Image (cartoon, helix red, strand yellow):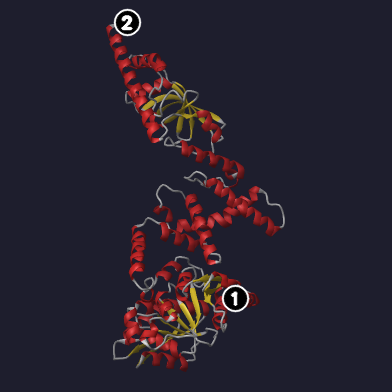
Amino acid sequence: MSEFQLSSAIKAKQDFERARRLADLKSIMARVTGQPIGLLSYEEVRQKLKAYGVVSRGLQDIPLDAIIGSVGRYAEFTRDFLPKLDESGDRWIKIKVAVDEPSGVPHIEVYKIGDAYFVLDGHHRVSVAKQIGSKYIQANVIEVDTKVHITPEINSEDLIIKAEYADFLEKFKVNKLRPNVDLNITAIGGYRILEEHIEVHRYFMGIENERFIPLEEAFNHWYDNVYFPISQSIRKRGILREFPNRTETDLYIWISEHRAALEKELGWVVNSDAVASDFAEQRGSRLDRVATRLTEKIVDSVMPEELETGPPPGEWRRYKIRHEGESLFSDLLIPLSSENNNWNALEQALVIAKKEGSRLFGLHVMQNESDKDKPEVLTLKESFEGICNNAAVSGTMAFSTGKVSQRICDRARWVDLLVVSLKHPPPTKPTSKLISGISSIIRRCPRPILAVPGVVTNLETGLLAYDGSAKSEEALFLSAYLASKWGLHLTVITISEKGLMSAKILSRAREYLEKLEIKAEFIEGHGKIENEIIDTAHSINSELIIMGGYGRHPLVEITLGSSLDKILQISSKPILICR
């Protein structure tokens, strides 16, 4: 052996010993932290991912960092190919010496699964190459076909998930039925949940169709009618951006669980868009959502419920107008009492349902959960659902306990319009207003409110009271919708009590409606607001008054009074209150 070769061998031996010490140190740290450092077994990965077909890809330069496993020798090296056995020394040193010689070392043999490689022959060559800082190594590549893609970053937990995915794909023939669908999940056990969803869906399909449902048919129907609507909601709202390192299917599972909990609490079916939006509001990482949640917690802790003002004007409209072509009033909420109940609110809601194709949700708020079984409550449910059935309108009755106004506002988040019977309009005394149920609902309700004093109308003529405020802008928007969709004959009134520029305000409404090619009558009124509105509504035989909700701070409204309160006290026709 020449002096140069001897020197190279001594240096190689030192390098091996250093690599062995580092391997031992990493093994100790792995036992402390519980983090695995070993190579993956090719055979285990192949079986779990159901990878069988092979294709030779020839000689290639492959990245060393993408080599993550071994065929048969995965226990002899760490994940970064540090030698774990002293017996590897002689072979390792020979390879290290040969690397420095002109002839070099032969290429290695690897299997490729996804973007990851598994060494068939050449483990010591890989180990030496990594220790000398090489980035690539020449390899004869045999690619193994698999339906589940993996990357070099995969760990033991990821492998379990990928194995579950492979089983799922095979069981439901996903690649055959939906070859371009990505149902990747990032959590162990997620595919078990998906299987349960499909099996439950299959069970109810069998009941509905009165026949045996093949698994492939059940998967297709589940995908189209359950999974896809939620995935569309996720995409439309860009929700996935708020959950880094998660997948669309992860969110489908979470939103489905959120939906199940909501529907159990509410007692009715909630649409996919509403559930997805609420999930993002409750769990999303966007800064404005986080700030909103924090602000709401602070306000709830210090602000009396009676003085809460609800969401800002236009929030509901901004949500609804994203869905062009949909009815604005898809879901209606009608609070009902079991004591001396009249059905004017329900009858008025049925008029809207006929125009909009709406679903109706009745709500009865009780003092105790046990009240649900009382005869009068059961009769209320039976009557509500019977009236809806007779009208060929979807109707569901739900129950809740707690403070009536608070429960109504909580449930209103899940509908598009609250229809209330105006048995008890806002009182005149400030102290009574503070505890008035209808006043609290108007201040806090996140949706438009249709107050029905007693007379049920066909809603064919409407009077819009417009003053240019933010909430009256919402009333203008809804008036335009009703005129366009329902054919409502619309009159717009602007009132000046002190000779202010009502004509200029009225022209804004005129321009807005003309752009939409909506015909309307325009009136410039002078005098006391509530008197002008009621008198005009009477003179044109209006069947609906449309106006904004409270415009001032609750304390000011309670102390000084409101035109809206006075109209609610004296009007015999329904009032649509917009926020």
Relative placement, left or right, of 73 versus 17 is right
In front: 139, or 131? 131
Say above or below: 147 vs 233: above
Quadrant housing residue 530: bottom left
C-alpha span from label 1 to label 2? 101 Å
Say above or below: 236 vs 402: above
* Amino acid type at mark 2: Met
In the picture, which quadrant includes the C terminus? bottom left
Which numbered circle lies on residue 377? 1
Q: Would residue 395 be seen by someone viewing this image from the given angle?
A: no
- x, y percent for residue 422: 49, 84
Which numbered circle lies on residue 1? 2
Q: Residue drawn 55% across and 40% down? A: 166
Say above or below: 40 vs 185: above
* Amino acid type at mark 1: Val
Q: Residues within 10 Å of mark 1 (few under 14, many from 20)?
A: some
Q: Would residue 268 be seen by someone viewing this image from the given angle?
A: yes
Q: Residues within 10 Å of mark 2 (few under 14, many from 20)?
A: few
- x, y percent for residue 121: 47, 21
- x, y percent for residue 301: 35, 67
